[in-house]
Image: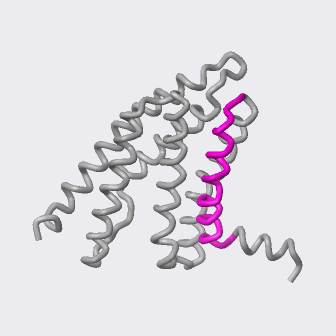
Amino acid sequence: MRPQDQFKRLLGDPNTLTLFRVLTVPLVVLLLLVPNRFTCFLAALLFSAAAITDYFDGFLARQKGMVSNLGKVMDPVADKLLVSCTFIMLTSLGWVPAWVVCIIIGREIAVTGLRSLIAQHQEDVSASNLGKYKTGFQIAAAIPLLFHYPYFTVDLHAIGMFFLWGAAIFTVWSGVDYFVRFRRLLQS
């Protein structure tokens, strides 16, 4: 098989796309260790590419019938790693309030624990629509916050902060929704 054919096959594999998301995390972190207009621009582009793979890996898995246990477990882990590490780095730079990041990461840990309990009861652990909105707002906040610097007089940081407040609202709302929907499992 030719190398370009192997590359195309790899790109069509949902688990490869998930792995790409995981491997992107240390690169984004390293770029943000020396924040400047160039490294932040690269971090934003890498984050954006990784975030796009979140859509495509699920789409490909369903379309090609390649849904796997590895994918079911690693996909949400990859998302949480990418978003959490990015927001931690943005907090370390003083670009976002730490308490908002604590809410985001706290919710992720709590819901991950609940999802484990749900899976033990052989119930559906797929993301709710509120969870998808939460992820969308988190990504929409992270990208302009990563760019940080104004480009063409556009204050990208202010745009990112707007979406961050939306992300905070959907983060709390979707977390509460998960625990309310599955409260019967917590009582057993």
Residue 184: in magenta span: no
Q: Is residue 15 above or below residue 173?
A: below
* Percent position of residue 44, x then y: 65, 40
Q: Quadrant of the C terminus?
A: bottom left
Q: Quadrant of residue 153?
A: top right
Q: Residue furthest bottom?
A: 1
Which residue shows up at 24% across the image and 77% down it? 121
Colour basis? one colour
Residue 92 or residue 105, whichever sits in front: 92
Please state the extent of the stretch shown in magenta in the rendering. Answer: 12-36
Residue placed furthest toward the top: 153
In magenta segment, residue 26? yes
Image quarter of residue 109: bottom left
Of residue 136 and residue 171, the one placed in the foreground of this image is: 171
**Front in this rendered view, residue 152 or 90:** 90
Location of residue 177 in the rendering, given as x and y in whole percent from the top left corner: 25, 51
Residue 17, quarter of the rendered image: bottom right
Q: Is residue 90 above or below residue 135?
A: above
Quadrant of the image for the N terminus? Answer: bottom right
Q: Main secondary structure of the magenta part?
A: helix
Q: Residue furthest right?
A: 2
Residue at 67%, 32% in the rendered image: 35
In percent of the image, x 31 and y 74: which residue is there?
A: 119
**Residue displayed at 17% across by 68% down:** 185
Residue 120 lies, with reference to residue 165, above or below; the image says below
User: Could you say where residue 100 lies in the image, as x and y percent from the top left?
Assistant: 38, 35
In this view, the residue in front, 128 or 74, is: 74
Location of residue 151 in the rendering, given as x and y in whole percent from the top left corner: 70, 23
